[in-house]
Each structure stands twice: as C-alpha cells, then as structure tokens.
Image (cartoon, rainbow, N blue to C red):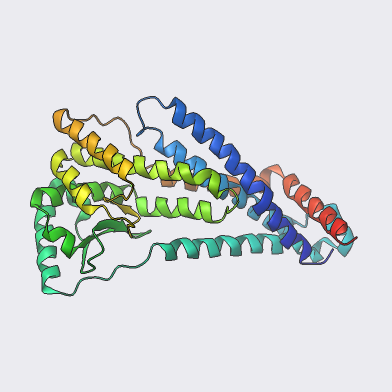
Amino acid sequence: MTEAAFPLLGAAFIVLIVLPACALLAKLGLVLIERRQQGGVLRGLNRRFLLVTGSSALPLAWFFSAGLHQTEAGASALVCLLSHDDAALCFEPGFFSLLLAIGVGVGWARAVRSAGRVDVSVSSSGRQLAARIERLVAESPALNALVGRVVVTDDASFAIGTRGFLKARVFVGVEFARAMSDEMLVGALHHECEHVESRDPLRYLLLELALTVNPFGRFLLEPHVARWKAAREAHCDREAVLNGAAPLALADAIVRAARPSPRETAALGYSDVAVLKLRVSFLLAFAERTPERCCDEGRVAIPMVALLLLVTLLLPHQAGTDALDAVHLTAEHMLAYLSR
C-alpha cells in the first residue's frame, strides 16, 4: 500500500460512508424532535442545531484526532506497521488527518465566501442615518449591545442584517431605512440585537460548513436547516417584542426587508413567503397578547459545540482508535480489490 492510498481512500470512506450515515442518524433525531416538540416550533432550537452541526463536526474531529494520536504514539494499524517494519516510519494516519483538515479548511473558505461582502457608506445620507441610529440606540437601554456595532451601507439591494463571525455587526441599508419610521427601525434593530447577542452569524456559518463538508448527506439535512433558520428568525421576533419592539411596526419592517434573494445571513428579511406569513401572524398575535419568555435558545449553543468538540478530540487519546484501524484495513482491502 503506497503512502497516499490510505489517506485518499480513508478520506473518501469518511465522506462517502461515515458522514452520510451520521447525517441519516441526525435526520432521524430531527424528525422526532420536530414531530414531538412540546410548546411550539420555537422550542428545541439548540438541540436541532447541535444535531446538524454535530453530525459532521464530531466524526471529523474524532478521525482527525485519532490520526494524530496514531502518528504520535506509533500505534497505527498492524498492516501499516508491517509494511514499514518501524512504527516511526508509518506516516499514513498523519497524512489522513492532514487531508481531513485540508477538506474542512476548503469547506470553511467556501462557507465564508458565500456570505459575500457589504461596503460601508461614505455618503452624507449614510452619515445622517448613522446619527439617527445612534440616537435610537441611545434612547433604548435594551439596545446597548448595538453600541458601536451598527454600520450603514449605500448598497440599494441591502436591507438590514447581522454579519461578522467573531465580532457581529448590524448593517443597515440607506434606502431601506429611509422609508422606515423610527418605531419600525427600532423594531428591526431589536430583532438584529438578538442575532448579535446570540452570535447567529457564526452559528449560520457552522450550519453551512456542516452541510458543505458532507455533500452526500446535505440533501438529508438541508430541509431541517431551512426550518431551523425560519424558527430562529421567529424566535428573534419574539425576543424583540419582549425587549420593547412594537409588534405591528416590526411586522411592517419584516415585509419591507424581505428580498427574493437576500444577501444577509442572519437578518430581518426572509425570502420564503410561507415563513413571512408565519412570522407576521405571530406578531399580530403578540399585538393582542404579549408573549412570554420561555427559554434561552441561542447563547449557550456555541459553548456547547465547543465543549463537545473538545471531548471528541480527547476521546481517541483515552479510549483508543479501533475505528480508525477498521477504516485503515478497509482501505487496504479496497486497494487490493481494485488492483486485481
């Protein structure tokens, strides 16, 4: 078996077999959660997020760590040791981990590039809007998280949205805000404030990355991701109302912000008509009866993902790497079969 055979065939096995199988298991869990969800469609968002991201992130993290552990400890599969006579010369697991890391890096770059770019306004109308927004934020204590985080853009195709994976900022289009009353704009800012505080741009990126690195499992999970995003936007609407936004003004702002092909990732406007109708119906109900804050569906998601990743990375060093040995042997058998 050549140096490149196991890394290539092993990585192909992960992408073609392991990740789609994990996506199928995640889909079964998502179906159960969505069908048996108690308390409405806005609950269980963290569990659904963890299932989608974990279905790709956890197996990749485990195999990556297992490959590094075998390289470091010289504990590779017996077939590798026999072919080199010396554990110190068996580099295939390390190359395998490197190939997985490159694949994730390419997926990350694609996911980041898909978010696009928005230019900052340099016009006088942009400066006027920035001053107006600064005044509105200062008048509402619930918007303190947006101090210094609102950016104005002259892009006529852009409405309002939250961007920034490490430091989230709210971008507001001049044309969009010009037609908005102060009450409507405050409602939209309350909605985006929830995105900022929950680090939603990063969560949306992780969801897209989970789908990108699992191309053969993507079709299983993509409908659930779309439903999760719709529920997340509705959740932000509810939090906006609880923090002082006027429901009817926010509903008006949502309709005005809707775009056929929105460039925003985490944003007020959502292009799906059915989702718009659902969110507006919620807000009409909130105008008659103030909603109750039932749960925190955002702020703990990223720490939970980080904790699960850390545990997964440590597992091969404590519990062994038998699964990687099985993949290694399977790749060896595949090579022997193909070379007949």
* Quarter of the view holding residue 249: top left
Q: Is residue 67 left or right of residue 340?
A: left
Q: Position of residue 258 (x, y in %)?
A: 26, 52
Residue found 42% across the figure and 47% down from its top: 302
User: Is residue 107 shown left or right of residue 184?
Assistant: right
User: Is 166 positioned to the left or the right of 150 in the image?
Assistant: right
* Relative height, residue 320 to residue 80 (above, below): above
- Quadrant hosting residue 235: top left
Residue 239 in the image, given as x and y percentages of width and height:
24, 39
Relative placement, left or right, of 182 versus 233 is left
Tally of marks: 0
Most foreground residue, 322 or 40:
40
Residue 252 % position (x, y)? 16, 46
Residue at horizontal 31%, vertical 45%? 273
Percent of width and height locating residue 283? 21, 36
- Residue at image position (78%, 63%) is 5
Whether residue 314 is visible: no
Q: Which quadrant holds the N terminus?
A: bottom right
Residue 47, by quadrant, is: top left
